Image (cartoon, grey):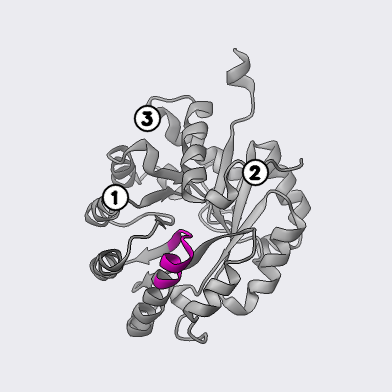
């Protein structure tokens, strides 16, 4: 086996929730396991702005961790609407790398779709003003999601990642036409996810990044258990052969894509 084959892959977990109760109690160990698996950087996502100070503190305390903040669509009816000014102010922090997650979720919270749409538009405006990428959650809302993202793009271009992409081919095509990135989670490694894998295989390789969405959606062999950033290596290992790449090659390509999408985190040399 060559040195390249035995070396740790250069991976990034572009979306996790290190402040959630499942993970926050053992952060040093979680981060150490990630580093041991070749995951050099992680982006932890704040889903309610009232929790932003705690999420920011995690990023400040751990060199490999960056963060983003926004109002999750499932919380949009319960939380005060984020203002563009509030999001822009948060974005001044050097480890703040993205706006969101925001978006639309009509699966669990269809009754709040109107306020979700208002919130999404505010986050789009903040992404346009800051130049930081928008982080989108979309579930059972493909038509409205495409329309609102395109409406924003027509006003002013912005960068965007479709987090944990598991929607249909039409939304994938529309997102790619707008220059967006699709994020691969552990769902893509599930045996019955062939339709989703087909979408990713039709996607240009330079428009894909990896994530865990920890503590949710653990890939095999940990499916059904708590997820954590180290497990992005399992997803990468499962997907790399589909692209005809070795794990190190697939890791390098998706990490380069992460660096282009999240320039504030690009090339950061983190302490072990």
Give the mark nearer the N terminus: 3 vs 2.
3
Give the mark nearer the N terminus: 2 vs 1.
1
Name which residue lies at 37% across and 36% down. 205
Could you tell me residue 136's position as x and y percent? Answer: 41, 63
Q: Which mark is residue 243?
A: 3
Question: Where is mark 1, residue-wise?
Answer: 176
Q: Quadrant of the C terminus?
A: top right
Question: SS at mark 3?
Answer: helix
Name which residue lies at 71% across and 43% down. 270
Mark 1 neighbour class, 10 Å CA radius: few under 14, some 14 to 19, many 20 or more = some
Could you tell me residue 132's position as x and y percent? Answer: 48, 60
Mark 2 neighbour class, 10 Å CA radius: few under 14, some 14 to 19, many 20 or more = few
Q: How many marks?
A: 3
Give the mark nearer the N terminus: 1 vs 3.
1
Q: Quarter of the image holding residue 202?
A: top left
Question: Where is mark 2, residue-wise?
Answer: 268
Question: SS at mark 2?
Answer: loop
Question: SS at mark 1?
Answer: helix
Q: Do we see residue 108 in this rendering?
A: no
Gap in angstroms between the C-alphas marked 3 and 2: 27 Å
Look at the image and say whether residue 23 sits in the magenta stretch. Answer: no
Left-right relation of 14 to 110 = right
Q: Quadrant of the N terminus?
A: top right
Could you tell me residue 260's position as x and y percent? Answer: 47, 45
Could you tell me residue 240's position as x and y percent? Answer: 44, 31
Q: Quarter of the image holding residue 149?
A: bottom left
Magenta region, residue range = 125-135
Left-right relation of 216 to 118 = right
Gap in angstroms between the C-alphas marked 1 and 3: 18 Å
Q: Which label lies toward us, 2 or 1?
A: 2
């Amino acid at each position: 086996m060559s040195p390249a084959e035995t070396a740790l892959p250069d991976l990034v977990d572009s979306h996790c929730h290190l402040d959630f109760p499942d993970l926050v109690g053992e952060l040093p160990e979680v981060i150490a396991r990630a580093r041991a698996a070749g995951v050099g950087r992680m982006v932890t996502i704040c889903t309610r702005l009232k929790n932003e100070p705690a999420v920011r503190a995690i990023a400040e305390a751990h060199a490999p961790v960056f963060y983003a903040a926004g109002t999750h669509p499932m919380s949009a009816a319960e939380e005060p609407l984020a203002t563009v000014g509030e999001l822009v102010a948060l974005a001044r922090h050097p480890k703040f790398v993205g706006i969101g997650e925001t978006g639309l979720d009509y699966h669990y919270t269809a009754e709040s779709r109107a306020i979700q749409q208002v919130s999404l538009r505010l986050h789009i405006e903040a992404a346009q003003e800051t130049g930081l990428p928008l982080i989108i959650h979309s579930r059972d809302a493909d038509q409205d999601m495409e329309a609102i993202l395109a409406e924003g793009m027509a006003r002013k271009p912005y960068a965007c990642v479709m987090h944990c992409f598991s929607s249909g081919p039409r939304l994938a095509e529309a997102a790619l036409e707008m220059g967006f990135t699709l994020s691969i989670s552990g769902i893509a490694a599930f045996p019955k996810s062939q339709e989703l894998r087909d979408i990713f295989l039709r996607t240009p390789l330079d428009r894909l990044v990896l994530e865990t969405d920890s503590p949710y959606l653990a890939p095999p062999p940990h499916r059904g258990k708590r997820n954590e950033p180290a497990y992005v290596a399992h997803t990468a290992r499962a997907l790399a052969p589909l692209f005809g790449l070795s794990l190190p090659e697939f890791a390098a390509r998706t990490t380069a894509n992460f660096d282009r999408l999240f320039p504030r985190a690009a090339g950061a040399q983190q302490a072990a």
